[in-house]
Image (cartoon, rainbow, N blue to C red):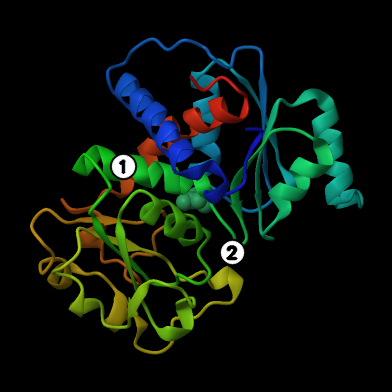
Amino acid sequence: MKAILGIESLGTDGLRRLLDRAGWYAGALAAGERLHPTLAGTVVGTLFFEPSTRTRISFEVAARRLGADVASFDPDQSSMSKGETLQDTVLTVSAIGMDVLVVRHGEAGVPERIHRWTGRPVINAGDGTGEHPTQALADCLTLTRRFGAIAGLRVAIVGDVIHSRVAGSLLLALPALGAEVVLVGPGTLLPESRFRSTDDLDSVLDEVDVVYLLRIQRERGAEGGSGYEEMFRLDEPRAARMRPEAVVMHPGPINRGVEIGSGVADGARSLILTQVANGVPARMAALEQVLGVLP
Ligand code: CP
């Protein structure tokens, strides 16, 4: 497969294969094992047209862990400021000699266009309100390592679901792997979907294994509306009503005091930094997949 643009095209078997490899890498990294440089001699280009902390850095670490070189494109310091178009820019970067392009862009569909224009392997690192498949992969890896399996888990996805590309990918990946999903938020922030939905967070807290929080995507014009924090923020009194073994997840960046209280973000139920750490093995597997070296 020459591109990872979304979850659906992976298929359930493909998703499981990526998770197996990512899980193997997670174990190897934790054990400090020396890794075979499966990407030696390749160049991974990271093209982030929107800000990122964890996705960009974890892709770059993942590439280097496997022996690849990394070329990092910064649009603000590029010749786009002199009028070069997006298409000419990516064709130029590609001509320098990239083996794979990792692309983030504010508009859904741009990674697919770049794949078409360049003929290069492309990984979607988040496209507008479209998808963020490697975040979903990191999250599924996190759940698998925590619970042993995803099948049978009940997951509440809470907040600005409609604008979230992470939700776009999770709503494909989690059911494919056998989880049950409930969407929680104000009606204005929930998509029309086949999933059960509610605006009453308190009503689902004691029935789910995972509360997966999302920030309000203000950069995409989203607003929570009055009383949002009171209704949807997961703070310590609310988290205390969760099942004893239930966990809290968030793809980051978190907005403390808005969708999550600090006591919860930093508390024992929180897997937020585990999700970040698992981004590296997940992206190692994704890079291997598009470069044709996934075993
Ligand atoms: N979760 C996520 O995509 O975070 P960044 O924007 O920091 O990459």
**Residue 142: which numbered mark, if any?**
1
What percent of the width, then of the height, locates residue 72? 67, 33
Res 247 quadrant in image: bottom left
Check the image and name the residue furthest to the right.
83
Res 142 quadrant in image: top left
- Residue placed at 10% from the left, 61% from the top? 243
Front residue of 63/110: it is: 110
Amino acid type at mark 2: Thr
What percent of the width, then of the height, locates residue 175? 37, 56
Secondary structure beneath dot 2 equals: loop
- Residue placed at 18% from the left, 54% from the top? 267
Q: In this rendering, does residue 53 appear at all?
A: no
Amino acid type at mark 1: Thr
What percent of the width, then of the height, locates residue 7? 52, 48
**Quarter of the image with the N terminus in it:** top right
Which residue position is annotated with label 2? 129
Locate residue 282 relative to residue 245 in the image: left or right. right
Secondary structure beneath dot 1 equals: helix
Mark 2 packing: few (<14 Cα in 10 Å), some, or many (20+)? Answer: many
Q: Is residue 99 above or below residue 215?
A: above
Front residue of 58/82: it is: 58
Which mark sits nearer the N-terminus, 1 or 2? 2
